[in-house]
Image: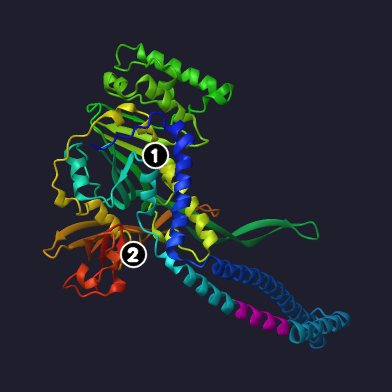
Amino acid sequence: MAVRHVIHEPLREYAGKYKEVFRKNAAEAFEDLVRRSGVDIAANKQTCRRIKTLTRRQDHISASLGRVRFLNCICILFMVTGSLFFLFFILHFFYPELPGDKYWGGSGLLVAVLALILKLRVLNKKLAALQSIAEKIRRELKTEMAEAYGQMASLNQLYQWDTVSDLVMESCPIFSIDKFFSCARMAELEQKFKLDKDLGNASSVRFCYSGSINDNPFVLADTWNFGMGTKIYSGSLVITWLERVTYTDSNGRTRSRMETRVQTLTATVEKPCPEYFGKKLLIFGCGAAPDLNFSRTPSGLAGTGKGFFHRMKLKWAIRDLVKRSNDMSTSFTIMSNHEFDAVFAALDRDNEKDFRLLFTPLAQQEMLKLLRDTKHGFGENFVFKKKKMINFLYPGFMQDFDISAKPSLFQHYDLDEARKNFNHYCNDFFRRLYFAFAPLLAIPLYQQHEAPGDIFQEEVLYYASSWEHEATANYYDRSTFKHPSCITDCILKTVPEYNEDGTTTLSVTAHGFGGITRVDYVPVFGGDGRFHDVPVEWVQYYPLSHTSPLILREVSENGEKRPVSELFPGHKTEKENVRFRRNIAFYIPRR
């Protein structure tokens, strides 16, 4: 029987144990990669030292070039200005009404000649010399960079998609992370915990992790979403009219005349416009309190111990909850820990008994610690929704973080910089992942509850799920699949067809929008006392879709070392067209 790992106090155990354990393991993992790669550390240091020297020289030369170009522009300005003064001086002899002065003319000619001499004799030569040096440095820098990347090639090839997830499991054994999101894991969430996997055509999975905590499954997904918003378009129209004005002439008489008035009228229209945005969510399946539903969003009360006004806000919130609890027309009953109820604010719960079953005094205490901590964690910056046996968490602190841990994030030409980047990313990844799960770990029953036994066949384990299919398609630039007339971003959806040779053909459909330019005429009252139709151009969007094929196959850990003819027997594709991601090999057939 597998050993069950339990985290009783998530905040204290992270700060006192897991943070340091992970930091140490990440540092050791990088040094192990360096040893395995055989990188010549001393040679790379020398090369990078030369690169830094060349970079400093390049910056210095660029600054000098900027100064010389600025002086060159000043000289041209003086040449033009001086020539104009001299030209007016010459024209003054033929057209006396034109301004002209012999002193200004002579000075202008002198300035123009001196500026020309300075430009030709000094600045042009200086500019040519600096440009020659800059080009030489650029070539040397390119050569040194190529050498540095060559020195680091063996290390850069060792990074794997699961390098970081393996570190997480090694450092914090409560996490079990799959190689990829399989059909078996999806079926478990669907059939045992009633997850609705259909995201609709408005969402697509860009990346996902799946796994389990003490046999209870989870999915951490990065989704790309579409929604219809609005955009404000503006237009303008210039109008003119004659207006009679009165004035007093030099003799003191009142006279009138017609003058031309000019006015720019502006107008705006608001029209529908597609908007695209990313969202990360954590889905956790657990049979504890299977009939309970609730949701909580940041209440703004977690930091109430910081000042008088915060304490008053908490006091008022508790007073309102007590009043609501005493209202016999509602089913809400305040917890004995009033502070927890106000801060956690899951006020739409529909089963008080099950809510108390989950949030024991220990769970309330640990949840409050998480909500108030910003030293190690992220405070209350998360949304928590429970829908029967499925828990949804939306960690705000993950929204702008790349969770993919893709090998390219760590590849570098400088070993010292690679070490720094690797350790920083890994530690940041673990911190964000841990505190995304922390609200779940703060509830003891979620770790104590045993998931139902595995009822799925072993052979379906290594088939990728529909979410993993979308993530594979999204590995490419989305424009690869979109309709030629599409002018917006797009949402990728996939439909699989399983082939006899073990491969899967995905029909990747990109849903986007084309656009037609329209013009609205908005009446605007002008200064001439009349309404004028101001034209405002806007874009009318219409849906477009385009379907393309993508071939994939689930592979072993050494998939990249296998020949293409073995991975895709009978397929006409080249090695350079095949990509590998999380134990999945895939390619786009040439059209």
Q: Which mark is residue 204?
A: none
Amino acid type of the residue that numbered disc 1 sits on in the rendered structure: Ala
Q: Classify residue 445 as left or right of residue 551.
A: right
Quadrant location, the C terminus: bottom left
Quadrant location, the N terminus: top left
Query: Label 1 crowding class (10 Å Cα cut-off): few <14, some 14-19, many 20+?
Result: many
Task: Report the residue at 48% width, 46% height from top.
Answer: 24
Of 267 and 443, the residue lying toward us: 443
Camera-near label (1 vs 2) is: 1
Q: Classify residue 375 as left or right of residue 472.
A: right
Tell me which numbered mark, 1 or 2, is placed earlier along the sequence.
1
Of 76 and 372, the residue lying toward us: 372
Q: Classify residue 506 as left or right of residue 369.
A: left
**Residue 257 at x, y percent in the picture:** 66, 61
In magenta, the rendered stretch is 124-137
**Residue 274 at x, y percent in the picture:** 35, 53
Local SS, label 1:
helix
Q: Is residue 421 visible?
A: yes
| Scheme of image coloration | rainbow
Query: Label 2 crowding class (10 Å Cα cut-off): few <14, some 14-19, many 20+?
Result: some
Q: Is residue 348 magenta?
A: no
Q: CA distance from mark 1 to mark 2?
A: 31 Å
| Residue placed under numbered mark 1 in the picture | 436
Amino acid type of the residue that numbered disc 2 sits on in the rendered structure: Ser
Q: Which mark is residue 479?
A: 2
